[in-house]
Amino acid sequence: MINVTETEANTVATHLHMQRIDFDNTYIEKGNTDTLLINSIPCPFLQQNQCSIYEQRFQGCKEFPGLHVPGFTKRTFTTFMHYNRCPIIFNVVEYLKVALNFF
Ligand code: SF4
């Protein structure tokens, strides 16, 4: 799931020439702690295998797969969900398997 800040939601809504309420109704799901999440998988902004809002994409997208973000070991499930789709994750995991003598 993609986390979205209020500022990011405002930025993308403006970029799409949408009222914020319409943007929220179309793309946002509110989490239990009022966090904002993109409401569908795959992401609705993924069009023809490209990000249609690339310049305005969310911070989580910019940091994906977040291997440099502290707490990586708490996100291994999410990381492995993308193992077969994300070349960065694939290459890092394959590198670690060799480096750590996993076989
Ligand atoms: S980079 Fe773009 S298409 Fe990919 S998840 Fe983020 S907003 Fe969606």
Image (cartoon, rainbow, N blue to C red):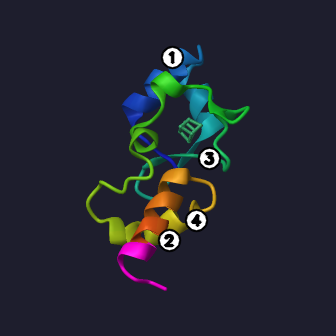
Q: For the residue with label 1, is its CB less than 8 Å from the closest atom of ligand 1?
A: no
| Residue found at the very far left of the displayed protein | 70
The image position of residue 67, as x and y in percent, is 36, 57
Task: Write down the region rendered in magenta.
Answer: 97-103
Q: Contact (CB < 8 A) between labels 4 and 3?
A: no
Q: Dot 2: few (<14), some (14–19), or many (≥20) neighbours within 10 Å?
A: few
Q: Rounded to the nearest whole Å, what is the CA distance between mark 2 and mark 4?
A: 6 Å
Q: Toward the viewer: 22 or 77?
A: 77
Give coordinates of residue 47: x percent, y percent. Answer: 70, 32
Instruction: Locate residue 87 relative to residue 100 in the image: left or right.
Output: right
Q: Is residue 14 magenta?
A: no
Q: Nearer the viewer, residue 59 or 91?
A: 91
Q: Residues within 10 Å of mark 3 (few under 14, many from 20)?
A: some
In the picture, the disc for residue 39 is: 3
Which amino acid type is marked by label 4? Met
Label 4 vs 3, first from the N-terminus: 3
| Marks 2 & 4, CB-CB < 8 Å contact | yes
Residue holding disc 4:
81
Inspect this view and state whether residue 1 appears: no
Label 1 to label 4: alpha-carbon separation: 32 Å
Question: What's the mark number on residue 14?
Answer: 1
Which one is earlier in the sequence, the residue at label 2 or at label 3?
3
Q: Residue at x 38, y 44 (%)?
A: 63
Amino acid, disc 2: Phe
